Amino acid sequence: MQGLGARRWWALGAVNLSVLAVSLDGTVLSVAQPTLSTALDASQSDLVWFSAGYLLVLAAAVLPVGLVGDRFGRRAVLLASLALFGLGSVLCAYAGSIAVFLTGRLLQGLAGAGITVMALSALVVLFDEHERPRAVAIYQAAAFLALPLGPILGGWMLSQFWWGWVFLLNVPVVVLAAVIGFVLIPESRSAERPGLDPVGTAASAAGLALVIYGLVRAGEHGWGSLDAVLPIAAGAAMVAGFVWWEHRLGRMPAGRPLVDPRLLQPGPFLWGSALAAVAGLAMIGVLFTIPQYFQGVQGTDTLGSGLRLLPLIAGMVVGAGLSGRLLPAITARLTIALGFVLLAGGLAIAVTTTPTSDTAFTAGWTALVGAGTGLALSAATAAALAGLSAERSGTESAIVQAFNKTSGPLGTAITGSILVAVYHTRLDSAELPATVAESARRSLYDGTIAAHAAGAPGLEQAIRSAFVDGMSVAFLASAAIALLGAVMALVLLPRGQSRGTEAGQPTEEGTVDAVAH
């Protein structure tokens, strides 16, 4: 791939466009939910499954789609996934029923697995170990940009046009990404066609899907509900069984495991993947709660909430850019730890947020949180990808994405359960009228509407203060997770630069350069 020269960096643009389409869709959906509730007569449960169904299919498909890319061609899988994502977007836009819309979302989930896995795989194929940190930083920065663009574009379009346009917005993006990708991204596949490993493929898909399902249920009903605990336990057992099977198959003379068993042993790849997930786990609480704070507590609209996320995203982009410079200078271990410390510091300041905090204050701490997240997440991802060969980059990238896709629902479930528990406790102590208290327990928005209808501003303030108290405790828990991430980075990662020959990474022995043409 080195013969491609500057073309590799233009190809990275196609990769970034592909990921941008997937990221935009997720943020736009959150903005469009109230509109979808009316247009499709969707219940709250339906709205939950519009997101949960997407996540379940994506989680189940990441490892199988990585294998397909390694066997049949990674660019082909990326282009097919972009086409499928566009089709799913069209189905969502013109859906006249809940069933059709959900079908579109499931297609998008399958396509999203192919896009995200093949995009990360392209970084391994296109860039060598020395250029990869910079490429990862650019890749992450592009993905971060979707976080404010979705609410800003979606909120504006929903206020001006037919709601279907927010999903059709994906179509020109995926078409452009497909055209540029076809022209600039070279086709690549494993030189030695990998085995199918049906047992490992089925175990990984079912295990990840069950874990995600349980985490979604935990976010809805709490950690004590059996429909959350049982799927999580069963999924975790299946994932453990998958790891055992891959090691067993790897020891067989003719065994062809789905994943190189050495990658599942403690080492830079495994720890880098886990630390990237911890970074997402720590900051997801901000993405989950801060839009509710802006809209439900401070009274901004969707567009205003999106604009107030810009400091967070700016910090993420800056942090991602810094990771490419710091990694070769101070090692992955210290770069990731520094990112987690910045993230924890920003979250510690966030704990002091009040219902009347001004915009400059929230902009300051969200920018710090963003910088820490961008630095830790990009550096951890680069550490995981360092030393990997292009030979099995599809399945190897799928493991990184499996960690990543699990951290979001887990972080949301943890943050949501803490926030709701404290929020309900504060509501109980506020001695609200029964009708107002019932509405407030359903949601912050229902509570403030009921309090306003009762003509009691003091009740509205009590409800908002209860939410902010819950948010502060959730931020405190996120700060503790970030500090744990810093300790993990310092303890688990090697003191020198992470190389492919470190423990837990595949070596050059036994690998063959990927076929590329």
Image (tube, rainbow, N blue to C red):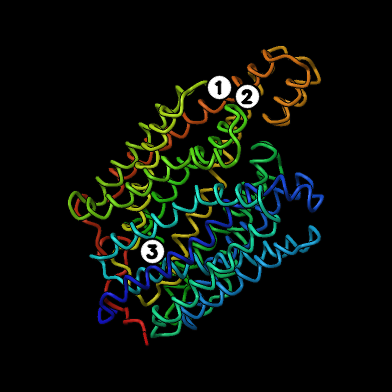
Between the residue at mark 2 and the residue at mark 3, the CA separation in whole angstroms equals 42 Å
Q: Which of marks 1 and 3 is nearer the N terminus?
A: 3
Between the residue at mark 1 and the residue at mark 3, the CA separation in whole angstroms equals 42 Å
Label disc, if present, on residue 423 of the rendered structure: 2
Residues under numbered marks 2 and 3 in contact, where contact means CB atoms less than 8 Å apart: no
Relative image position of residue 187 (x, y in whole percent) = 42, 83
* Quarter of the rendering occupied by the C terminus: bottom left
Relative to residue 23, is residue 235 drawn left or right?
Answer: right
Label disc, if present, on residue 263 of the rendered structure: 3
Q: Earlier in the sequence, mark 2 or mark 1?
A: 2
Q: Which residue is drawn at 30% across and 46% down?
A: 336
Between the residue at mark 2 and the residue at mark 1, the CA separation in whole angstroms equals 7 Å
* Quarter of the rendering occupied by the N terminus: bottom left
Relative to residue 46, is residue 261 drawn left or right?
Answer: left
Q: What element carries label 2?
A: helix
Q: What residue type is labelled 2?
A: Tyr
In which quarter of the view is residue 94 placed? Answer: bottom right
Q: Is mark 3 on a helix, strand or loop?
A: helix
Q: Earlier in the sequence, mark 2 or mark 3?
A: 3
Q: What element carries label 1?
A: helix
Q: Residue at x 51, y 26 (%)?
A: 473
Query: How many residues crowd around disc 3 within 10 Å: few (fewer than 14), some, or many (20 or more)?
Result: many
Residues under numbered marks 2 and 1 in contact, where contact means CB atoms less than 8 Å apart: yes
Q: Which amino acid does label 3 sit on?
A: Leu
Relative image position of residue 55 (x, y in whole percent) = 61, 56
Label 1: which residue?
A: 469
Query: How many residues crowd around disc 2 within 10 Å: few (fewer than 14), some, or many (20 or more)?
Result: many
Q: Which amino acid does label 1 sit on?
A: Asp
